[in-house]
Amino acid sequence: MKVKILLKEFFQYVVLNICGMVGLSCYILADTFFVSNGLGANGLTALNLAIPIYSFIHGSGLMFGMGGATKYSICRGQKEYNNANKSFSSTILIMSALAAVFMLTGIFFSEKLTILLGADKDVFHMTKTYLQVILLFAPAFMANDTLLCFIRNDGNPKLSMIAMLVGSFSNIILDYIFIFPLHMGIFGAVLATGLAPVISLIVLSEHWFSKQNQFHLIRINPSFRMTGNIISLGVPSFITEMASGIVMIVYNAIILRLQGNIGVAAYGVVANLSLVVVSIFTGIAQGMQPILSRVYGYGEHDSQKQILKYAFKTMLVISCVIYLIFILSANPIVSVFNSEQNVQLLQIAVTGLKLYFTAIPFVGFNIIISAYFTSTEQALPAQIISLSRGFLIIIPMAFFLSFLLKMTGVWLSFPITECFVTLTGIALYIKSERGKKNV
């Protein structure tokens, strides 16, 4: 009976979170579609050069949201209600401080940042505009990421999903209006993206004022221990997002050398589709996290293993379906983002799609096992996995394989890296289980 209840709860949380996370990932995918159709290959290149900064902002929001909400769930599972409120208040405090830093960067350093990211004279203005506006909206993005996690962990995954979907669909509608009827160009695209989390926060405010809400802001003295614990639990989420930004910067630099702006535009198509795929697995990971943290707080080890098993089976089924779609429909998928019918862009992106996404099952495993470690307060193995797939392996692999195999090497560096990290994750899980048996 208990297994059936766990299974029902697992799918309730996971399905709602997958829907919400796919919606959230469509922020950038909508920009990719409308920018490619409204501004052509140069617009797509500018967008792809600026996207890593969005990854830093989103990763910071997820770090505070996942870290703080995980600590909140564990405290409530252990009936430490005052500490649960402290975790929420501490999260909001440190999140606000970093959001202010991002805003100041947008105001004073966006031009220097544009140069650092490699924008040439053809795409400089569009890249700078996108960067500046996305940084100015950083507080909205980060507050949205943080509250989505807390509200989901507070027993309201449905509202989290609705807020993510409403925000995403608003972005799509505003993208169209700003770029086409109003002819606002790249500024219209980024303004639509920036307004989306604001709209999502308005939807989320319903929980804040409802009787269901169990987390509250309280007066606290800044605690380095609490702050460190929140950041430690959230760092794997931050590294995952930040790494995707750093990897995009590295890939952009390599591809600019190999194929120029058209190559970067083609990579932009593949990378932004990858955001959607990753969001599905993040949806599974975030869906299982509140349940895992709760049963961990109760000390129910068998339930933890059962939830992890459900997550892996769900991931494998979804992986097979997604890769089959990409193999069978690579040409039409790329064509959607190729308004100028550029033959070179089509060839590069189609080849990349088929090679790059052989990584899908490994990516899914790594995201889920990292979330499992985080949810059960095993920060170190989660950080090892995140660092390995974000920095330690993929960047040297990208340089090495691109030197040997040119563009083919660029595409293959991602699946090879994720495969190595999967083997590391399996070893860390086995070590963790053996350690529990010896206790």
Image (cartoon, rainbow, N blue to C red):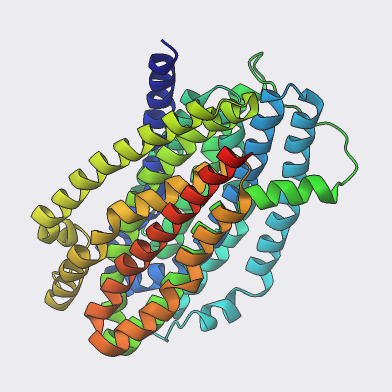
Residue at x 30%, y 37% (from the top left corner):
313
Residue at x 59%, y 22% (from the top left corner):
206
**Where does the image place residue 73, in percent across and percent down from the top left?**
64, 30
Furthest-right residue in this view: 221
Quadrant occupied by the N terminus? top left
- Looking at the picture, tell me which residue is in the foreground, 159 or 370: 370
**Where does the image place residue 358, in percent across and percent down from the top left?**
23, 60
Furthest-left residue in this view: 328
User: Is 125 above or below relative to 268?
Assistant: below
Which image quadrant for residue 236?
bottom right
Q: Is residue 74 left or right of residue 427?
A: right
Total labels drawn: 0
Quadrant occupied by the C terminus? top right
Residue at x 45%, y 80% (from the top left corner):
124
Furthest-front residue in this view: 438
**Where does the image place residue 60, in percent across and percent down from the top left?**
61, 55
- Looking at the picture, tell me which residue is in the foreground, 370 or 306: 306
Residue 41 is at least partly visible in this image: no
**Where does the image place residue 416, in percent across and percent down from the top left?**
31, 69
Residue at x 16%, y 67% (from the top left corner):
350
- Looking at the picture, tell me which residue is in the foreground, 305 or 406: 305
Which image quadrant for residue 2?
top left
Residue 7 is at least partly visible in this image: yes
- Looking at the picture, tell me which residue is in the foreground, 62 or 163: 62
